[in-house]
Image (cartoon, rainbow, N blue to C red):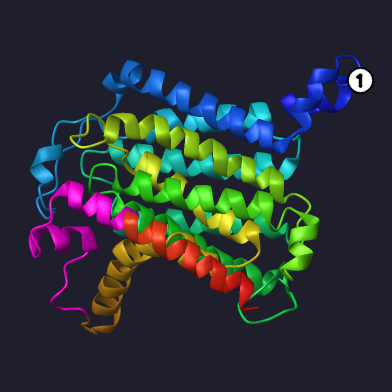
Amino acid sequence: MLYWLGEHYSEVYGPLRLLTSYLFLGGLGAALAGLLSWVLLPLLWCHLPQDRGRAFAVEGKESEGKPVGAGGIFIPVFLLVCLLILPLDPRFLEVLGCVCLAMLVGFFDDRSQAGWGEYRMGALDVGISIIGAMVICQMDSYDLWLPLAKTAVSVPPLIFVPAAALLIWVAINATNCTDGVDGLSGSLCALAFIYLGGILYGIVGHREIARYLLVPHYSGGAAWALLSFVMTGCLAGYLWYNAYPSRVLMGDAGSRPMGLLLGLLVLACGNPFLIVVVAGVVLVNGATGILKVGLLRFFKIGIFKTVRYPLHDHVRQNRGWSNTQVLVRFILLQAVVTPTLLILLFKVR
């Protein structure tokens, strides 16, 4: 809406030209999303379901009774702010629809007394992931750039959709598994969204820089970055209350749409390997546990038998790390590893 106003009325009132600046809109969107999330969460979390605790989780009893499903508050804020600042493009409406669907599935699971079960949630995640992959490629060939290759590869939709859906599914579930320590999932994903926003706005969305780094230029890259900046703002408002000791928990209503958006933005950058670069700690913490359980349950193959997953539970129980130590050390790992891998990813090519 604001972008449209800037396009059509900047000649009537000059300062409205700011509304056509993606950098200005990104800053405005992040600030507005952060403020709204910060204000609305304590006003509305009394209407959220309460966490029932998890017997298998380390310190699971400590979360029992807290409001859970905060994503049911800050994800609608994300949707509203995005509708306000994004250009009028059907693809972005489709993305927001997928995020809303993931939030609703997660919220109903949070409200359910017994939970919806692993297989039911996994199947729903698969469906949402396939829709998300179709939204990204619009059922047309999609150009991807890969490590150590100077030229882009055009991938037909019959190959892109299942492969992209797998990546999105892993992102959803790894993010969900990481939501077990106050502030951990939100902080790691906020870092990932900041990096993705920078890549979308300053590299693949910038014609000259993309040409210099030998990566494809995506004309809509800067607009995709707005999604990243707005989600970062929402997470900032949420983390204000989720910092240890937390007063409200994200729940599946927050972690699942957040993971979905993470996967979608990685694909919008054009390089699926970026999921390892910007969210490597999230994958190691959560996705390796999914791999362990999957191999044991379906193929009777046991790996990492001495390691407890998610990894944050292992270091708390076996290494004696406090919640604060887990949070700070995992963030430091992500903050140091990601810039190093980004340099290798872009310059080695």
Give how far across and how far down residue 241 sits, in percent. Answer: 29, 29
Count residues near mark 1 (Cα–Cα under 10 Å), then give few for <14, some for 14-19, many for 20+: few
Using the rendered view, name the quadrant where residue 268 is placed: bottom right
Question: Quick check: 51 left or right of 6?
Answer: left
Residue 166 appears in view: no
Compared to 312, does 151 lie above or below? Answer: below
All told, the count of numbered labels is: 1
| Residue 317 drawn in magenta | yes
Residue 338 appears in view: yes
Compared to 70, does 105 lie above or below? Answer: below
Question: Quick check: 259 left or right of 88?
Answer: left
Question: Quick check: 261 left or right of 335?
Answer: right
Give the residue displayed 47% in from the left and 21% down from the top: 36
Boundaries of the magenta span: 304-331
Give how far across and how far down residue 153 sits, in percent. Answer: 73, 76
Q: Is mark 1 on a helix, strand or loop?
A: loop
Residue position for label 1: 11
Using the rendered view, name the quadrant where residue 149 is placed: bottom right
Give the residue displayed 38% in from the left and 39% down from the top: 253
* Depth check, front residue: 126 or 191: 191
Give the residue displayed 52% in from the left and 42% down from the top: 99
Give how far across and how far down residue 328 sits, in percent. Answer: 26, 51
Give the residue displayed 44% in from the left and 45% down from the top: 190
